[in-house]
Each structure stands twice: as C-alpha cells, then as structure tokens.
Amino acid sequence: MNYLELKVPPPLVALGLAIPMWLVSSLVQPPNVPSGFRVGVAFVLVLLGLSISIAGVVRFRRAKTTINPIKASAASSLVTSGVYRFTRNPMYLGLLLTLLAWAAFLSSLIAVLFLPVFVLYINRFQISPEERVLSSLFGAEYLEYKKTVRRWL
C-alpha cells in the first residue's frame, strides 16, 4: 500500500469522500433538523475550516516553502508559528471541518461515519510519509516540534 503515499492530493481525497457522503445521505431518512439551523451550522464549520486552511497556506507562503502536499521533500523551511503552534496539519484539519460541514448540511448522521475514513487515510498515506520526510530534512528541530504540537489538535 506504500504506492498510495503522497500520491492523491488531500483535497481530492476529501472530494472523493464528499460524493459518497451525499449518496448515503439520500438512502437514510435524515433527522428532522430545521434547514436554517443545519445550514447555519454548516456555514460556521466551513468558514472555520477554510480559515484554518488559509492560515496554514499563508504561513507557508510567508516562509517561502511548498504547499504542494505531494512534494513534501521540496519543503525549504519548518513552519512552527501562527496556526502551526496549535496543529501540525491545519490544511488537513480544515478539510476535515469542511467535510463535517458537508455532513451537517446534508443533515446526515451516517455521512459523519466517513470522517474517520478521511482521518485514517490522511494519517497513513499523507501525514506519516510527510513526517518521515520532515524528520530527514529538519532532524532534531522537527522532532522537538512534534513533541510540543499535536498532529491534528
């Protein structure tokens, strides 16, 4: 399964899960949640997710390092400031929150079951390989950072 490491861009993984979330939501009667409430919750969650993701991208741009998740070895600096003081993976956290927003919009509890699939896939095929690369590039500095900042939150 190593052939999947750093191959599928995480936004495509999220999209690949959003489609079946929509499909399964149509198979099960949704809970009776007022549309204004579920849309409001979805809006807040997607806004939060986008804000966290954008904050991560901005920090990478300021550090003049790659934001391409497929080219982890092109990282030119270790970013530990801003949103990276709270999570090592704000862009992936933002995608997860966006998927949660989608489930809220769909008003589908069964769609929420796809969120652990996203986390497991990203942990195994994106974050773990990135961590190996960053350890080789930044050594003790990255290992110390890993001790103080959690992977997700």
Image (cartoon, helix red, strand yellow):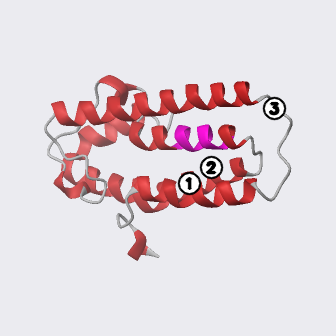
Q: What is the crowding at mark 2: few (fewer than 14 residues within 10 Å), some, or many (at least 20)?
A: some
Q: Which residue is mark 2?
A: 115
The span shown in magenta is 96-103
- Counting from the top left corner in percent of width and height, residue 13 is at 48, 59
Q: Is the residue 147 above or below the residue 119 in the image?
A: above
Going by the numbered disc 2, the residue's amino acid type is Leu
Figure check: 77 above or below 82: below
Type of residue at label 3? Answer: Val
The residue mark sitting in front, 1 or 3, is: 3
Q: Which mark is residue 33?
A: 3
Q: Which residue is mark 1?
A: 118
Q: Where in the figure is residue 18, as x and y percent of width and height?
A: 58, 54
Please give the name of the residue rendered at 26% of the width and 52% of the height, measured from the top-left corner: 68
Question: Overall secondary structure of the magenta stretch?
Answer: helix
Q: Position of residue 30 (x, y in %)?
A: 82, 45
User: Disc 3 and disc 2: Cα gap in Å?
Assistant: 20 Å
**Residue 12 as seen in the image, left or right of residue 145:** right
The answer to whether 150 appears left or right of 31 in the picture is left
Mark toward the start of the polypeptide (3 vs 2): 3
